[in-house]
Image: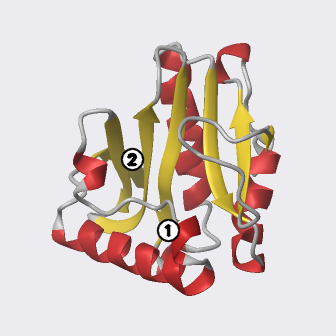
Amino acid sequence: MIRIDLDDPARPDVHQLLSEHLADMFATSPAESVHALDHSALSHGSITFWTAREDGVLLGCGALKTLSAGQAEIKSMRTTANARGRGVATLMLEHIVSEARGRGFERVSLETGTEDYFAPARRLYARHGFTECPPFGDYTMDPNSVFLRSFPALGTTSTAT
């Protein structure tokens, strides 16, 4: 059974996954368009970080960053290579949106890339009710970024399998 629990971004296996994530981001996007966080930034008090594990084996991670009283941002959604195609990203996204709803956030936003590499992520977010929006928080217009948002307080739920 896959479990999603609070975790430490500095934990060795998580640190490795986040390092792979950052390496992929810099390999697919210009440096100025990479907004992924490293393990130390994900330890900030405004961020809640979770991992998905099965029998203790890391399958993926994700985080929720508080931007304001009513708005949060999804950060660092990533699955391991061995977990891809198993629904781990869907479970993590549903968990994060549920947490945001439970905390009373009116809007959950995220930034992802425009390159083909990010197409599966964009499809995942679209299936879960995320729609394009203008830049939010400290982001500015960037041809390498797409900004998405959802409204979990309004009951956005998944119909994906």
* CA neighbours of label 1 inside 10 A, class few (<14), some (14 to 19), many (20+): many
Residue at image mark 1: 79
* CA neighbours of label 2 inside 10 A, class few (<14), some (14 to 19), many (20+): many
Q: Residue 20 sits in which quadrant?
A: bottom left
Residue 105 at least partly seen: yes
Decide which of 53, 74 is in the foreground and name it: 74
Three-letter code, disc 1: Thr
Q: Residue 7: x and y, percent?
A: 25, 49
Whether residue 73 is situated above or below residue 18 in the rendered picture: above
Give the distance between the C-alpha atoms of the residues marked 1 and 2, in whole angstroms: 12 Å
**Helix, strand or loop for disc 1:** strand
Q: Quadrant of the N terminus?
A: bottom left
Q: Is residue 49 left or right of residue 10?
A: right
Residue 160 at least partly seen: no
Q: Residue 112: x and y, percent?
A: 65, 59
Q: Residue 82: x and y, percent?
A: 49, 81
Q: Residue 108 sits in which quadrant?
A: top right
Q: Residue at x 75, y 52 (%)?
A: 161
Q: Residue 117: x and y, percent?
A: 70, 78
Three-letter code, disc 2: Ile
Residue at image mark 2: 4
Whether residue 13 is situated above or below residue 121 in the rendered picture: below
